[in-house]
Amino acid sequence: MAIQIIPFGKNLKKDTINNDSIVILTRCARPKNLSTVCRSVLELYQSMMDNYDKILAITHIIIFDKYKCSKEDVEEAKTEVRNVYSDIFLGFNYIFEYRGLKKDNQYGAKMLIDSVDNLMSRYYTHFNPWLYILDDDNIIHPGFVHILKDHMGSEKILIFGQNRTMKRFNGDHYTETCILTKNSMFIDNTGKRTNDIETLNVISVNTHPDSAQFLVRYDTLMKAGNYSNSYLVDFDTVWKLYEMFEDDFEFIEYVASYYNYIDSELIQN
């Protein structure tokens, strides 16, 4: 099978840049998880190479929190990442960044904002990739490749399903499937749209998206002022996107993401 690879890299000529590229953003305060995260990105890349005659170029930007990661842990993690990605060359790139705030109570939202602000400075000309948040406690879901394949060229804001596994206080694990729709996302028990997360959580955690549950194009995100500088960066970002671009949302009713797959810290009663 002939593979058409869409290039992604620095100093490319304008006619080689295509919208069918994805930038995966990983905020890293737990370097020990990075090899697991990267192996899942590698599986995504290999699945595209093995199954599709046209693939997206992938850039994985790993943003180390310079105030939460020791130099020793960072260097060890970088070596592991290089080992995972050692055989990748066509249509794939990975980048290490060092960002963060000394007293950060927003769980690294500013790291995402600064990385995206700097993104286009790395390239010869402007292009419009997908942006995807894959934090250091999560991995790529096997269904994610179908999202990318089925939406080549689309500039919609994509919301898709998620498997959510959480740990209760008694140690038991609780698993549920979150499928969001236009009639459920941000909708309270009176049928009204609200950004009051406490009100929404009384109904169900299935009323609002997680970071790993949406894809947005760079241009669209920047029209909305980049990611929200908030502890609830995913909730607040999707909220403002929905307020501005409601008609540009596409809800996909199958699971293509995990929630806190590695060492989940969320505890529910």
Image (cartoon, rainbow, N blue to C red):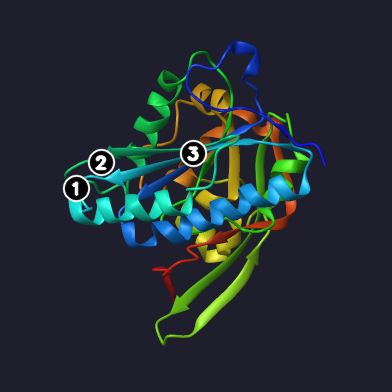
Across and down, in percent, residue 226 comes to 45, 29
Across and down, in percent, residue 101 comes to 21, 41
Name which residue type carries label 2: Gly
Which residue is located at x 47 percent, y 54 percent?
84
Q: Is residue 46 left or right of residue 73?
A: right
Q: Residue furthest front?
A: 87
Local secondary structure at mark 3: helix
Q: Nearer the viewer, residue 166 or 2?
A: 2
Q: CA distance from mark 3 to mark 1?
A: 25 Å
CA neighbours of label 1 inside 10 A, class few (<14), some (14 to 19), many (20+): some
Q: Is residue 241 above or below residue 71?
A: above
Query: Residue 154 is drawn in which quadrant?
Result: top right
Mark 1 sits on what residue?
67
Q: Is label 2 in contact with label 3 (beta carbons under 8 Å)?
A: no
Across and down, in percent, residue 70 comes to 19, 54
Residue 237: which disc?
3
Q: Is label 2 in contact with label 1 (beta carbons under 8 Å)?
A: yes
Q: Is residue 99 left or right of residue 232?
A: left
Which residue is located at x 42 percent, y 30 percent?
116
